[in-house]
Image (spheres, rainbow, N blue to C red):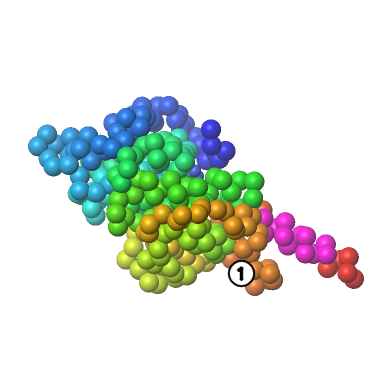
Amino acid sequence: MHGMHARLPKNFVLEERIERYAQVIELQPTHYAGRWADACRLLTGPDTAAFERIHVDLGCGKGAYVVQAAQANPHALFVAIDAEPICVAYTAQHVMEAGLRNVVVVPGLGSQLASMFGPRELSAITLNFPTPFPRKKEADKRLTILERLMEYREVLADGASVTLKTDSLPFWQFSRRQFELAGYRMLWLTDDARGERPDSIATEYEQRLTAQGATVYAIEATPDPAPKHVEQTESLSLADYLPEDLSTLSYVPHGMQGLVTNRRNHEARLRGKRR
Ligand SMILES: C[S@@+](CC[C@H](N)C(=O)[O-])C[C@H]1O[C@@H](n2cnc3c(N)ncnc32)[C@H](O)[C@@H]1O
């Protein structure tokens, strides 16, 4: 089971919610590997064509992004995936309340993508504000680590892309190197995603964190031919991507407070010893 737990509101019975919105939740996604577009066309009506594209929103949170994206792209099928059952329940609720027929919600992990989808089945994967897991020992949980990016290659169609948005400069810099190691070509690399694409859908975290002063960093990348030699050569602790002088860090990225506090305390102790 995944190691994160969202706080449950009062009177929230998870099983009840999952049952209530079961119509849009898929508990056995591997059954559809390779045939999502065709299998899901019946969601929209008996005589409709298969979906033109499949878009995965990985780590969908409570679903605000996927609802808006699905409304704007009715010919695409959206598969919203999250590790947290409570997020699955909320996303399913929002999908049903919006009356959307082109979204399926799946409880699961990013590491399961290659078993959920067939080769070249996906047109896009979005990673909106993924949990940074800043410590080295948790690096394998990051959705942009080399191993995951190599797995995504298997399910991405020609010309498909992976788009990352984050409030964390260290996570963005780490991810950029991982995309390069996995043989992706950059289509978009920015330290001002909101300024450059002001009309892009702002996710729940994006709204909350930008209100707190966050900058939005983004990467959009597409797989080039697979690299001949795949090897992790980068530091796996996000502490190594923090600025040398932490006094220049005016905004502490989401999920990195512990790491930054430890570094600040460590530096204060060193200064104390030098006196
Ligand atoms: C910081 S939230 C961002 C939610 C949403 N994308 C947004 O931008 O508002 C990160 C989400 O990713 C989910 N998550 C973290 N690691 C995951 C993994 N390995 N596989 C699937 N979901 C994951 C968490 O449960 C959480 O809902």
Q: Nearer the viewer, residue 228 or 253?
A: 228
Which residue is drawn at the image coordinates 64% and 55% (left, top)? 237
In the figure, 43 relative to 211: above or below?
above
Residue drawn at x 79%, y 64% is 268
Range of magenta residues: 259-270
Q: Tell me the amino acid under the disc marked 1.
A: Ser
Rendered residue at 83%/62% (across/down): 269
Percent x, y of residue 68? 30, 52
The quarter of the picture where residue 273 lies is: bottom right
- Coordinates of residue 194 in the picture (x, y in percent): 40, 68
Label tally: 1
**What residue would you read off at disc 1?**
250
Q: Which residue is nearer to you in this view: 152 or 82?
A: 152
Q: Position of residue 84 (x, y in %)?
A: 47, 38
Q: Is residue 230 above or below residue 98?
A: below
Picture quadrant of residue 192: bottom left
**Residue 195 pos. (x, y %):** 40, 72
Which residue is pictured at 68% across the width and 69% down the height? 244
Q: What is the crowding at mark 1: few (fewer than 14 residues within 10 Å), some, or many (at least 20)?
A: few
Magenta stretch: includes residue 163: no
- The answer to whether one can see residue 248 in this image is yes
Which residue is the extreme one toward the left?
47
Closer-to-camera residue (185/59): 185
